[in-house]
Image (cartoon, rainbow, N blue to C red):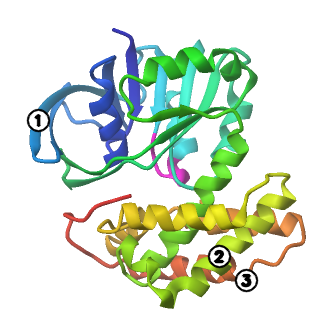
Amino acid sequence: MPRVHIIGQGAIGLLYGYFLKSVADVTFCLKQPNSAKQYQYQYQLDKTVELCDFKNQANNDIEPIEFVIIPTKAFAVLDAFMQIKPRLTKNAVIILSHNGMGSIEQIAPLLIAQQQLFFLTTTQAAYKASPLHVIHTGSGASNLGPINHAAKQTQHRVAEFLKPALQNLNLVADIDQLLWHKLLINVAINPLSAAYEVQNGQLTAPKFATEVFNLVYEVYLVAQSQGVRLELAKALHLAYQVMRSTAANYSSMNRDITLGKPTEISAICGYVVEMAKLQHIDTPNNLAMLHAILALEKAKKSAPLDTPLH
């Protein structure tokens, strides 16, 4: 079996590990692992509970890495990558998977020509009821897009490897459109659900409609200025579709705020604001939400762990 390394122990990364165990030898890379060389995780899918043993190792281990998924928070991607960079083989496959944008610009210039960079988005949902207990709360499509030239040369082989493990995996040629669609969904759901302390499904209420539209419309304008063609009506429909399909879930930003953790707001609304500045576009709604969430981060609230992430 091929070896796949996954960085960290986040809910989505652990979910990827569970799905990939049928086609790969999965190892989790941790910043500060304990002395145990293996963890036993409890996975709950529908009414089925399964115990799975996975190897773990330090990020600075000496074992070469040929295939790695980095599903950390956006603000932690560069640090995680730099820790494993010395271990990457010359033909390594690197897959980024997180909310927001900005990490591609950081990582791509650090690769050698043969190393393949991809981005993976997913509407799968999960949360951790405890550090070693993962609960799968929603199924959905995943999209894989090649970023650099090396990835475009091997995209079909990589997709074929992942397809048996990741349900409804699509290979997407236009990575820019994929990423902006994902950003649009993030902007519509994450900050509002965090600011108003509501579940994703509650954002479909009429009282949120104006804010949802304004935030999404600003993303649409900035995407257009970048040469990315999005259909506004379709984009809004997609955002509401995700709200409904994850109605009982709390967004990751909602949970981060509640638990007093850093959020990905700078890679979501913050990215929109920065790109808008370059094109002299006003984005007052995304700017206001950026400031609001940054202020909430400082509040460092606390909450129970048994709440779902999207």
- Percent x, y of residue 163: 43, 24
Circle 2 Cα neighbour tier, 10 Å, few/some/many (<14 / 14–19 / ≥20): many
Q: Is residue 2 above or below residue 307?
A: above
Q: Earlier in the sequence, mark 2 or mark 3?
A: 2
Residue lying at 24% horizontally and 74% vertically, measured from the top left: 303
Q: Is residue 95 visible?
A: yes
Disc number lying in front (1 or 3):
1
Q: Which numbered tag is attached to residue 215?
A: 2
**SS at circle 2:** helix
Q: Quadrant of the N terminus?
A: top left
Which residue of the protein is positioned furthest toward the top in this rendering? 1
- CA gap between label 1 and label 3 equals 47 Å
- Percent x, y of residue 134: 21, 47
Task: Judge from the rendering whether residue 163 lies leftward or rightward of residue 170; answer left or right.
Answer: left
Q: Quadrant of residue 214?
A: bottom right
- Name which residue type carries label 3: Pro
- CA gap between label 2 and label 3 equals 9 Å
Range of the magenta residues? 71-76
Say if the magenta span includes residue 73: yes
Residue lying at 58% horizontally and 43% vertically, measured from the top left: 78
Q: Is residue 304 above or below residue 84?
A: below
- Name which residue type carries label 1: Glu
Disc number lying in front (2 or 3):
2
> Residue under circle 3?
284
Q: Are marks 2 and 1 in contact (CB under 8 Å)?
A: no
Which residue of the protein is positioned furthest toward the right in this rendering? 280
Q: Are marks 2 and 3 in contact (CB under 8 Å)?
A: no
> Residue under circle 1?
50
Task: Judge from the rendering whether residue 278 lies leftward or rightward of residue 165; answer left or right.
Answer: right
Q: Earlier in the sequence, mark 1 or mark 3?
A: 1
Task: Judge from the rendering whether residue 233 lies leftward or rightward of residue 43; answer left or right.
Answer: right
